[in-house]
């Protein structure tokens, strides 16, 4: 547990730091409240153990600031003997507990153990809330496909095994890589990402492994590479299939020997890095092809293989992902949009999403900006979504006599009627169609009655 001890008396700080350090905690010290706040802003702590009486800002004022800036941090106030009234005030203001001076070492140890249990319970509750909401570290949905992805992340995350993530462009491979990092023991260390296709081959090696001064034209100083920058943490190599042969060879050596050599140097540098790679290319078919992918490197990267399915194979997740983006975009653009209209929901479910989650995000951002009310309607979505959801039919000449709003309402009704009719024919029953469309059975029945599509 990360603990910050705040006291203007060096002897008290030393005693508490030594006591808690012996218990295996990561303890930092601050001589006053302003220094403590600066340290917390730079690297938050799980627990703050603060004296009450200090210059510049007392413990109660520090408590208020910590609660405002770092609400997840537990706060324990160290008070003078007989100052129980102040301690009660601190508890009312959000302190976790208090310790009277002179403090007993066993009492402090017990208090910190209780605090650790509270933090563990909070973390477990947060995990359960994520699962109930169908979201896990940025991965949204409850389809069998996404549940399988989450299961692999939970099992592989705490290990140091290299992972190869495959999947189409836009499926969220970096989100999965970050989730693996967050589940690992390296979570407090850097997560460094490189798109291997974004740099020409002669620069990728320098970017990954660094270089020494004079290694090539323009190398006017020594520079560390991303392997060194990610030391202790995770290095994510996106589009790893685009690496040139020389870089592939050096990457394989780095993985096997856990050390790198900067371009232009002969001195090896040890590194402790977990590598997660991703690709949308068929690396199996690229092996043995001139200029393709090394077989030995593929096997070294694919200790754990994790395939991320395209969005069309997890359609039930589309509404939940869309609502997540809707909330994000409404806040970003200051729009009063709160939900999805039924026509928009059906259009989202009918579309195949060749651009996957990235395309869905862009479609929702467009719709949030253009929406006239508090719900996104079908007409707010990009035209290709509606075009794919229903066949294009000749426009009824009678529509020309209607206002645009009336014509759009009739067109949406016609689209919904055709769409729901097709869903009923495909799935057979109202219950099965409702499940496939992500709707409640009663809501679907009500809409069917409105459209004259009654079905027992």
Image: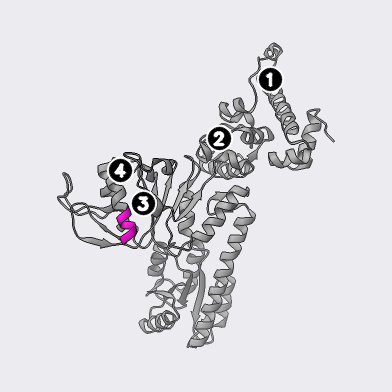
Please state the extent of the stretch shown in magenta in the rendering.
252-257
Q: Main secondary structure of the magenta part?
A: helix
**Counting other residues with Cα less than 10 Å from the Cα at mark 4, is it few (<14), some (14-19), or many (20 or more)?**
some
**Counting other residues with Cα less than 10 Å from the Cα at mark 2, is it few (<14), some (14-19), or many (20 or more)?**
many
Image x and y of residue 145, in percent: 59, 48
Q: Answer yes or no: do the residues labelled 1 and 4 have beta carbons within 8 Å? A: no
Of 103 and 136, nearer the camera is: 136
Q: Answer yes or no: do the residues labelled 2 and 1 have beta carbons within 8 Å? A: no
Measured in 3D between alpha carbons, the distance from the residue under mark 4 to the one under mark 3, in whole angstroms, is: 15 Å
Q: Earlier in the sequence, mark 1 or mark 4?
A: 4
Of 267 and 456, nearer the camera is: 267
Q: Which mark, by number, is residue 407?
A: 1
Q: Disc 1 vs disc 4: which is toward the camera?
A: 4
> On the rendered structure, is 233 left or right of 88?
left
Badge 4 marks a residue whose secondary structure is: loop
Q: Which mark, by number, is residue 296?
A: 3
Q: Disc 3 vs disc 1: which is toward the camera?
A: 3
């Amino acid at each position: 547990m990360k603990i910050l001890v705040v006291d203007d008396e060096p002897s008290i700080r030393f005693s508490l730091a030594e006591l808690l350090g012996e218990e295996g905690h990561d303890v930092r010290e601050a001589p006053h409240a302003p220094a403590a706040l600066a340290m917390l802003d730079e690297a938050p702590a799980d627990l703050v153990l603060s004296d009450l009486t200090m210059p510049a800002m007392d413990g109660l004022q520090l408590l208020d600031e910590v609660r405002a800036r770092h609400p997840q941090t537990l706060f324990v106030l160290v008070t003078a003997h007989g100052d129980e009234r102040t301690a009660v005030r601190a508890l009312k203001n959000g302190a976790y507990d208090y310790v009277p001076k002179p403090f007993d070492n066993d009492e402090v140890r017990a208090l910190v153990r209780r605090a650790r249990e509270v933090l563990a319970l909070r973390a477990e509750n947060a995990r359960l809330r994520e699962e109930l909401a169908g979201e896990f570290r940025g991965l949204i949905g409850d389809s069998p496909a996404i549940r399988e992805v989450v299961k692999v992340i939970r099992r592989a995350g705490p290990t140091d095994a290299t992972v190869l993530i495959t999947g189409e462009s836009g499926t969220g491979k970096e989100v999965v890589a970050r989730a693996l990092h967050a589940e690992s023991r390296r979570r407090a260390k850097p997560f460094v990402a490189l798109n291997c296709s974004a740099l020409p081959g002669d620069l990728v090696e320098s970017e990954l492994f660094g270089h020494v001064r004079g290694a090539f034209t323009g190398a006017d100083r020594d520079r560390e590479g991303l392997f060194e920058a990610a030391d202790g943490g995770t290095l994510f190599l996106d589009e790893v299939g685009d690496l040139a042969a020389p870089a592939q060879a050096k990457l394989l050596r780095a993985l096997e020997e856990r050390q790198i050599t900067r371009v232009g140097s002969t001195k090896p540098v040890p590194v402790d890095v977990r590598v997660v790679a991703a690709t949308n290319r068929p690396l199996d078919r690229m092996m043995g092809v001139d200029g393709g992918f090394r077989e030995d490197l593929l096997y070294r990267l694919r200790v754990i293989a994790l395939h991320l399915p395209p969005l069309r194979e997890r359609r039930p997740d589309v509404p939940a992902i869309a609502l997540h983006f809707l909330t994000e975009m409404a806040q970003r653009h200051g729009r009063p949009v709160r939900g999805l209209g039924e026509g928009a929901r059906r259009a989202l479910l009918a579309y195949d999403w060749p651009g996957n989650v990235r395309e869905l995000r862009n479609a929702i951002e467009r719709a949030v900006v253009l929406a006239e009310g508090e719900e996104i309607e079908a007409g707010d979505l990009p035209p290709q979504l509606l075009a794919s959801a229903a066949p294009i039919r000749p426009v009824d000449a009678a529509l020309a006599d209607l206002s645009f709003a009336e014509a759009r309402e009739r067109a949406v009704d016609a689209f919904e009627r055709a769409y729901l009719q097709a869903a009923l024919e495909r799935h057979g029953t109202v219950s099965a169609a409702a499940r496939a469309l992500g709707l409640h059975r009663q809501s679907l029945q009500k809409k069917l009655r409105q459209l004259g599509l009654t079905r027992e």
